[in-house]
Image (tube, helix red, strand yellow):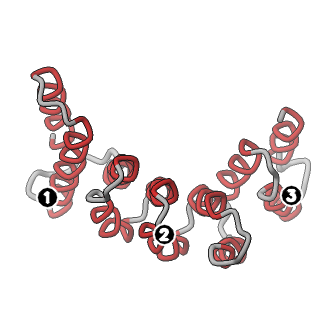
Amino acid sequence: SADANERLVAMLDLRREPLDEAREQLAAMLESRDFVSWFNAAVTLSHYADLSGLVSSHISRLGAPGTDLAREIAVLGALRHPRAVAPLVEHLSHPSAHLRALTAWSLGFIASPRSLPALHTAMHDASPEVRAEAALALGRIGSDGRPMPGDSAEAKRRSLLGESILGALSDLTGDPSPTVTRALDEARELVLF
């Protein structure tokens, strides 16, 4: 809503309000029903140094009865705190494909290398939605834009990561046509340098 976004913009002008007060107001906005408001608040909060109490609070909600699990998974992803990785990884095995895909998205948003093994496993999920989000998450974690020498361990890791992503995209398309094959080959060259 426009009013909520105006409040968010006003809070970001930290010259007008003490930092702690702005942080408390942003944390309160996480309870808003308006997706744009709470998502923007979570992303803004992710830039604060000490979020451990807030992150712990949202982690504890993951198992609480009556919790909107999708919302909590998304909030933890938007907060981008590494402490959320382990509890989120557990939700990659949730019975709901939608929640598994949202979890993969959240892990990609956090972009912690600690989530790589779980995301590699999610690349073999029965759901195409989960495989797609896992591929995107792996791409986000593996693409920080730094040039690497070809013989480094990091280059080898990225090469495997790129092949894994492209393999999943190829499986998702299921289209062996020359156009799709050529597009995948071009993408492979970009990803693998």
The kind of residue on which mark 1 rests is Lys
Query: Residue at label 1?
Result: 156
Does the CB distance between marks 2 and 3 fall below 8 Å? no
Residue displayed at 68% across by 71% down: 58
Say what secondary structure mark 2 lies in: helix
Q: Position of residue 12 (x, y in %)?
A: 79, 46
Q: Is residue 86 above or below residue 133?
A: below
Residue displayed at 20% across by 51% down: 148
The image quadrant of residue 62 is: bottom right
Quadrant assignment for the C terminus: top left
Does the CB distance between marks 1 and 2 fall below 8 Å? no
Label 2 vs label 3: CA separation?
Answer: 29 Å
The image quadrant of residue 113 is: bottom left
Which of pointers 1 and 2 lies earlier in the amino acid sequence? 2
Query: Residue at label 2?
Result: 91
Q: Viewer-proximal residue, 140 or 68?
A: 68
The kind of residue on which mark 2 rests is His
Count the marks: how many?
Answer: 3
Badge number at residue 25? 3
Left or right: 64, with 91 as reference point: right
Mark 1 crowd level (few <14, some 14–19, many ≥20, 10 Å Cα): some
Badge number at residue 37? none
Q: Viewer-proximal residue, 15 or 106?
A: 106
Which of pointers 2 and 3 lies earlier in the amino acid sequence? 3
Residue displayed at 16% across by 38% down: 188
Left or right: 13, with 82 as reference point: right
Left or right: 159, with 131 as reference point: left
Q: Viewer-proximal residue, 158 or 148?
A: 158
Quadrant assignment for the N terminus: top right
Say what secondary structure mark 1 lies in: helix
Label 1 vs label 3: CA separation?
Answer: 44 Å
Question: Which mark's residue is nearer the viewer, 1 or 2?
Answer: 2
